[in-house]
Amino acid sequence: IIHRHQTSWGWIHRRFVRNGRAAFMLLHVRRDESGRPIFRFPHHRIGTAAGSFLRLLLASAGLNWNGAFKQSRALAFDLGTIRQALALSWRRGTEPRHNGHAT
């Protein structure tokens, strides 16, 4: 942490969303011979995101800010993973691009 704003929940949330997206790409996505991404959609992340959201609400209602932060972090990671998978799913219909040019 270098700047004061990096301790805000919003900044940390965005960081974990990006972390979830990167982890999905590193752990679950491979490329075929033509460069197209190959992966399975992480359906289990939808369930874990829903569970984290519910636990976040319960922790916030009980004023358990430490627990709420932990659930917020888990939720952000799951949402980042789901967001990246959706982005890749939508891109599948387009032609693969290498160095900005269609092949």
Image: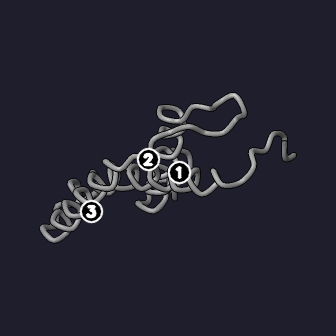
Question: Amino acid type of disc 1?
Answer: Gln
Question: Amino acid type of disc 2?
Answer: Phe
Q: Position of residue 59 (x, y in %)?
A: 17, 62
Q: N-terminal of the two: label 1 or label 3?
A: 3
In contact (CB < 8 Å): disc 3 and disc 2 = no
For marks 3 and 2, give the CA distance: 20 Å
In the image, 103 versus 54, the foreground residue is: 103
Image position of 1 with respect to 9: above or below: above
Position of residue 31 in the picture relative to residue 48 (left or right): right
In the image, 8 versus 75, the foreground residue is: 75
Q: Which residue is mark 2?
A: 41
Position of residue 44 in the picture relative to residue 13 (left or right): left
Kindly indicate the quadrant of the structure image that contains residue 68. Answer: bottom left
* Quarter of the image with the C terminus in it: top right
Kind of element beneath mark 2: loop
Question: Residue at the spot x=48%, y=35% of the render?
Answer: 28
Q: Which residue is mark 3?
A: 53
Q: N-terminal of the two: label 1 or label 2?
A: 2
Q: Which residue is mark 1?
A: 84
Question: Amino acid type of disc 3?
Answer: Phe
For marks 1 and 3, give the CA distance: 19 Å
For disc 1, the neighbor class at 10 Å (few under 14, some 14 to 19, many from 20) is many
Q: N-terminal of the two: label 3 or label 2?
A: 2
For disc 3, the neighbor class at 10 Å (few under 14, some 14 to 19, many from 20) is some
Question: Residue at the spot x=17%, y=61% of the render?
Answer: 64
Task: Give the color scheme: rainbow, by chain, secondary structure or one colour.
Answer: one colour
In contact (CB < 8 Å): disc 1 and disc 2 = no
